[in-house]
Amino acid sequence: MEDALYEITSMRLFAGLSLDSAIPDHTTIMNFRHLLEKHKLSRQLFKEVNKWLSSAGIYLKEGTIVDATIIEAASPTKNKAKARDPEMHQTQKGKQWFFGLKAHIGVDARTGLTHSLSTTAANVHDITETEHLLHGEERFISADSGYRGAQKREELKDIKADWLIAEMPSKVRLLKKHPRINKQPIRTEYLKASIRAKVEHPFRIIKRQFGFRKVIYRGLAKNDNKLAMLFALSNVFRVDQMIRAARG
């Protein structure tokens, strides 16, 4: 960041800095990050960005899509503690094993903007974080098959919204063996998938545009701070994309 502020004019302008005065060095930048972590300011910034988007009428709140993504952490033990991060855990996805954390998000179904975030170890099941990803005003909730049965959980049973949960992949494969007979159920699953696709936008932005593919810091709190900042910025990035698309 220190090098970027010296070398890239647009970044200095964004930060309100000039080469005529001292540019913050790496220690100053690190101390600022620690300040954000200590007071959970990234979470507050995430809320403020969402409040601004809501007041601007960009959030429509008619539906929420929930999903989670695994972000891997370093598993080697070549560190001072000579141990892997105790707050990270491994989990199996398909036939592969991953060690790290999970970012759980709730996304506006119309715009693809993230309104809720939860950070856990990778072995925490997606469905257990569902209650933290809803704002309470949605008329429907969309999710993949990993969330089947969510509406029956004690903490979610009073929610009045419709649940658009995908069928298990094995059942969808069976339906596709007889496409003529199962035309309507197959069409329903395609419709669910088309709605659910928007939840991938924030994940793509933080991983590809912002490069957050691997956990950098130890502990969930530090990484939650970083994720809150990244998802706040991804919302701004997404709105910019929407405005550019509208202008043609």
Image (cartoon, rainbow, N blue to C red):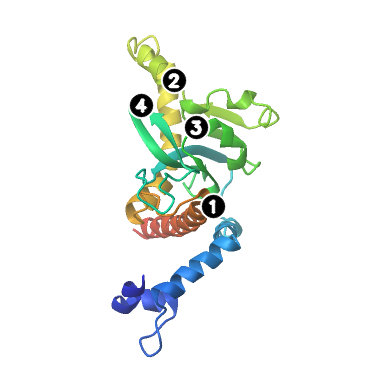
Give the position of the N terminus as an image quadrant. Answer: bottom left
Task: Tell me how far mark 4 sits from mark 3, CA to CA.
Answer: 18 Å
- Mark 1 vs mark 3, foreground winner is 1
Rate crowding at label 3 as few (under 14), some (14 to 19) or many (20 or more) other CA atoms within 10 Å. many
Q: Amino acid at mark 4?
A: Gly
Q: Which residue is mark 3?
A: 143
Q: Residue sitting at 58 percent across and 41 percent down?
A: 133
Secondary structure beneath dot 3 equals strand
60 on left or right of 76 = right
The vertical placement of 104 against 166, above or below, is below
Image check: 67 left or right of 177?
right
Tag 2: residue type? Met
Which of the marked residues, 1 or 3, is nearer the chain's N terminus? 3
Marks 2 and 1 in Cβ contact (< 8 Å): no
Which mark is first along the chain, 3 or 2? Answer: 3
- Choose mark 4 or mark 3, whichever is in front: 4
> How far apart, in angstroms, are the residues tagged by discs 2 and 1?
33 Å
Q: Label for residue 94?
A: 4
Q: Which residue is mark 2?
A: 168
Which residue is identified by label 1? 221
The residue furthest bottom is: 20
Residue in the picture at 39% in, 29% down: 92
Q: Amino acid at mark 3?
A: Ala
Q: State the CA–CA distance, disc 1 to disc 3.
A: 26 Å
